[in-house]
Amino acid sequence: MAKNYFEGWYYKHQFKDDTLICIPGIHDEEGVRRGFIQLVFRDQNHYLEFTEDEIGTVSDTCVELGKNIFTCYGIHLDNEWILADLSYGEFKPLRYDIMGPFVWLPRMECSHGVLSLYHNVYGRICWDNEEIKVDGIGYIEKDKGTSFPSEYCWFQSNAFNSEACVLFAMARIPYLGFKFWGHFAVVYDGVKEYRFATYLGAELLQCDKTHLRLKQGSYYLRIKVHFREGVPLKAPDAGSMKRIIHEAVMCEGEIWLYKKSELIFHECTPAASYEVCMNN
């Protein structure tokens, strides 16, 4: 692994009125390699750290940190904060990489990937002396590079009345001495994937704490968010996990997708995840 580097995965599980988020990863700070798991459940968060000797397999299909295992088939959590065994159904992947042609650029500050837009989740969680049966849905993405963007906005939810997923991200991207704004969005309605992206000519019309709007050709996407304060999470900065960001895990949201004047997707969600890190 390169020096001052990070690689992390975002496992989201939504069931009934609950959301469990697991963020396993590894990072290198000045040649010292460590593992970590960030856990968010019921508005509480916990950060676990692992020495290099406690890091096992690390790949897109398996991450082992201590007794905790994350795979494409499910996860096993065994730590002092929470116990869980969750199994996954078939993944719904993107049609092609979310980075588009940018995936081929070397030395990107942060590269993003989506492993599954939607899959079923089954199993049990033991937390705070309570055993919780899980029958819900999941989402998985990952990031790797040296640092999170200095400014960015990110929205995701698949807590809908249908097998849908909505994803939006915008970031200020430094590259070879220049900085530019990049953005993408995906609306998966359970059958078809609609994608907006900088590399497809999408125009960002609005991005703030309550509204996200994009236009691309004859398509128009609007997302309205009832913003709430989030839980603190650690984020990478030159390989160090000392930066603090905030993620609102249970935001209410509403999404409209139009093709010309025709409304082709409209859903409300009670449990969207939302991060806003902007200088103004």
Image: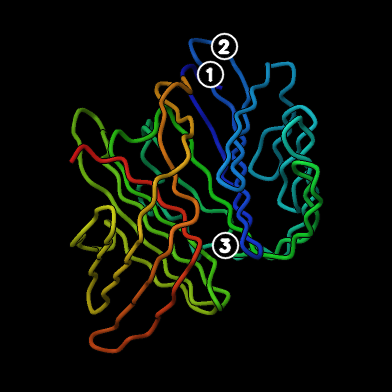
Q: Are marks 2 and 3 in contact (CB under 8 Å)?
A: no
Determine whether 104 is above or below 225 in the image.
above
- Residue at position x 57%, y 62% in the image: 93
- Residue at position x 49%, y 66% in the image: 270
The quarter of the rendered structure image containing the C terminus is top left
- CA gap, disc 1 and disc 2: 5 Å
112 with respect to 45 (left or right): left
Determine whether 240 is above or below 108 in the image.
above
Amino acid type for the residue under numbered disc 1: Asp
CA neighbours of label 2 inside 10 A, class few (<14), some (14 to 19), many (20+): few
Colouring chosen for the image of the structure: rainbow
> Which is nearer the N-term, disc 2 or disc 3?
2
Residue identifier under label 1 = 28
Q: Nearer the viewer, residue 252 or 89?
A: 252
Q: Position of residue 254 (x, y in %)?
A: 38, 71
191 with respect to 208 (left or right): right
Amino acid type for the residue under numbered disc 2: Val
CA neighbours of label 1 inside 10 A, class few (<14), some (14 to 19), many (20+): many
The disc placed on residue 93 is 3
Q: Are marks 1 and 2 in contact (CB under 8 Å)?
A: yes
- Quadrant of the rendered image containing residue 16: bottom right
The quarter of the rendered structure image containing the N terminus is top right
Amino acid type for the residue under numbered disc 3: Pro
Residue identifier under label 2 = 32
Q: Secondary structure at mark 1?
A: strand
- Residue at position x 53%, y 10% in the image: 31
Q: Position of residue 187 (x, y in %)?
A: 42, 70
CA neighbours of label 3 inside 10 A, class few (<14), some (14 to 19), many (20+): some
- Residue at position x 62%, y 57% in the image: 18
Q: Position of residue 227 (x, y in %)?
A: 35, 55
